[in-house]
Image: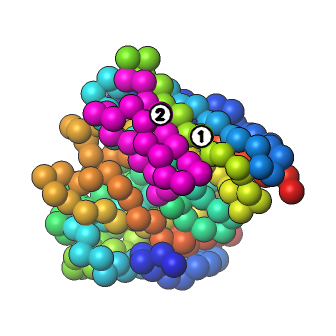
Amino acid sequence: DTEVTQTPKHLVMGMTNKKSLKCEQHMGHRAMYWYKQKAKKPPELMFVYSYEKLSINESVPSRFSPECPNSSLLNLHLHALQPEDSALYLCASSQVRDRATGELFFGEGSRLTVL
Amino acid sequence: GENVEQHPSTLSVQEGDSAVIKCTYSDSASNYFPWYKQELGKGPQLIIDIRSNVGEKKDQRIAVTLNKTAKHFSLHITETQPEDSAVYFCAAVSPTSYDKVIFGPGTSLSVIP
């Protein structure tokens, strides 16, 4: 069983809706990630938080807004999305020693459909 | 930046046979190479990894090899079982950017009973 929990598992939204994806981990990891995965493609990095601070934004459109309220929680706020944003959104976490270790623990993802 | 290539994109093997997936990377500074398995409807799961100070690592039926000179690394699965059917992603990580795990395009492995 994964120790990274994502909710909701499925989300359908219209282009004018505002919704949020949530991620939680209790492994004490201090790096948390959002990835986007399209069908038959590898995960594509969107954002990285390290010690609750945004450390990487891979030039993601502003209609995606990440938030890290504490060391266990990661949110992704969605607003005015486009149909091409439909994808599986994966949350991951990793330990941080001197740097993040690169060993990612993924959740099962939130499958988003934008109508 | 780092670029990871992976071959083959699809692989079918008979149950009990071996499967080999090969990857190449471009950044000679990369020193950590994890392999992830993604089953249908699930998130990727780390199954084995290797660091650049090691040439080979084994864990039961799976093994990884690394050739730093050629910038190649491979995953070997022996005695394949139907539950090995999944998409496998290799990845490379540079010590200057441990926050960025660069994935290969993936290999869809089917094990035929």
Residue at image coords 31%, 81%: A26
**Quarter of the image with the C terminus of chain A in it:** bottom right
Q: Position of residue A98 (x, y in %)?
A: 13, 52
- Residue under circle 1? B76
Front-lying residue, B55 or A21: B55
Q: Main secondary structure of the magenta part?
A: strand
Q: Which residues are magenta?
A: B46-68
Toward the viewer: B14 or A82?
A: B14
* Residue closer to the observer: B15 or A104: B15
Number of residue marks: 2
> Circle 1 marks a residue in which chain?
B
Furthest-left residue in this view:
A98
Dot 1: what SS?
strand
When the figure is inspected, residue A77 is found, relative to residue B2, above or below; the finding is below
Q: Is residue B60 magenta?
A: yes
Secondary structure type for disc 2: strand
Spot the residue most to the top.
Answer: B69
In this picture, residue B3 sits left or right of residue A75: right
- The residues bearing labels 2 and 1 have C-alpha atoms spaced at a distance of 8 Å
Q: Position of residue A1 (x, y in %)?
A: 51, 78
